[in-house]
Image (cartoon, grey):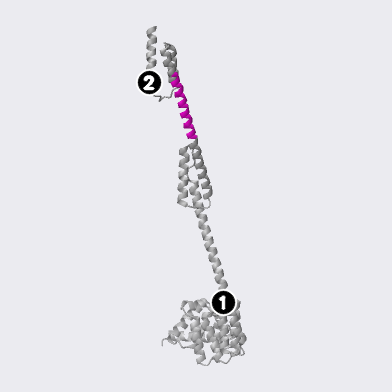
Amino acid sequence: MSPTTTEERQLVDEVVDVLTGPPVEGESAALSLKEQLQRAADEYDRRAAAMIGKALVDSLCEDPADARRLEALLILGLAHPSILERYQISLAAEGRRLCVLLENQGELDRARGLLELLALELPEDRQVQQDLSSFMRRSGEVDELVERCLRHAEENVNKGKLGEAISWLQEVLLHDQSRRDVARMIRDLRYKELADRKASRRRNRVILLLVVITSALTALGLREGKIRQEYASLPPLEGDDSAALDSRLESIDRLIASNRFWLGMFSVVDERSDLQQRMVELGAEEADQRRAEIELAYQRETKAESLRLKAIDSVAAGKLNVAHEQFTRALDCAPADWDRRKRIEANLQAIEKLLDERQ
C-alpha cells in the first residue's frame, strides 16, 4: 500500500470519527445525529466537504458494507446536499440500507435515530415511514407506533390528503385491532373522500361548462368583430339611382349569404329592406314618368294630327298661308318619331312652292 493511499485512509478514518462519534451521555440517538449534522456543517466548508465526500465515496466503493463510513457520508451529505447530488446518491435508499446495517450490528438506538431523522427529512417517502413503523413494531413500541400513525393521519387530514390519512389509520388497525374509534374514523374519512370526489366532479363539470361557454362567447365575439369589419368595408352607397342601389344591395346579399347569421345581422337586414323599398319606389317613379311621357306624346300626336287635318281643309279651301302655319305647328307639336312627319314636311315644301309662284 502506497504512502499516499495510507494517508487518505487515515484522513477518512479521522473524518469518520469526527462525524460518527459516540452520542453524548444522556441524549437520544436522534439528538446525537442532529448534533453530528451541525458538527459537519461547522467543521467543514463547502470545498473541504467536497474533498472529504469524494474520499468517502472512493472508500465505500471498496467496502460498501462499512456502516461507519456510509453513516459519515450521509451525515456530510445532509449537511452539504450538493455532495449527494454530485454523486447521485439517494438519501432514502442509502439511509435505509445503513439502518439495516446498524440494526444487524446490534446498534438499535443508532438505527432508530437515523430512521427518525430520515422520516423528518423525507416526510413524503412512504418506504422510509414504513421502515420506521416496522422498526418500532419489532421493538415492541406499539403504543408509540399507534400515536405516531395517528399523528401522521391527523397531519394528512389537515392537508386534505384523505387517502394518505386512511392508510395511516389502517396501519393503526394492523397493530391494534381493538381501536373501534379508528375504524369509525376510516369510515368517516371514506365517506368524506367520496363526497369530496363528487363535489370535485361537480366543480370540474361547472368549470368545464364555464370554459366551454367562455370559449364560445370568445369565438362569437371574434366572429362578430370580423363580420362587422366586413360590413364596414363594403362599398358605400353612391347616389340614389337604381344602379347605385343595386350595387349596394348585391354587396349586402353576398355578406348575408356568406355568414348566414350573426348578432349584428338585424341592422344589415334592415338596411337591405330599406334598399329594396327604395328600389320599389324608384321603379314606381320611373313607371309613372314613363306613363306621363307616353300620355304627353299621345297628346302632342293628337294635337298634331288635329292641326294636320285642319291644314288639309285649309288647302282645300285655298288658304295656303293658313295651311302652311297649321302644318308648321303640327310638326312642332308632334313627337320626333311621328310617322306623318316626312309627309307633312313634303306638303310644306309644296305649299311654299305654290306661294312663291303666286308672287
**In front: 118, or 307?**
307
Q: What x and y, as percent, mark residue 276?
A: 49, 42
Which residue: 55% across, 80% down? 164
Disc 1 is placed on an element classified as: helix
- Tag 2: amino acid: Lys
Which residue: 44% across, 19% down? 330
**In front: 135, or 56?**
135
Task: Assess whether residue 193 is covered by the magenta stretch.
Answer: no
Q: Decide: few, some or many residues near mark 2? Use Cα within 10 Å; few <14, some 14-19, many ≥20.
A: few
- Tag 1: amino acid: Leu
Q: Decide: few, some or many residues near mark 1? Use Cα within 10 Å; few <14, some 14-19, many ≥20.
A: few
Main secondary structure found in the magenta portion: helix
| Magenta span | 285-307
Q: What x and y, as percent, mark residue 232?
A: 50, 46
- Specify whether residue 110 is in view: no
- Specify whether residue 252 is in view: yes
Q: State the residue position of label 2.
A: 342
Q: State the residue position of label 1.
A: 194
Q: How far apart in space, not on screen, are marks 2 and 1 (Cα)?
A: 109 Å
Q: Quadrant of the N terminus?
A: bottom left
Q: Earlier along the polypeptide chain: callout 2 or callout 1?
A: 1
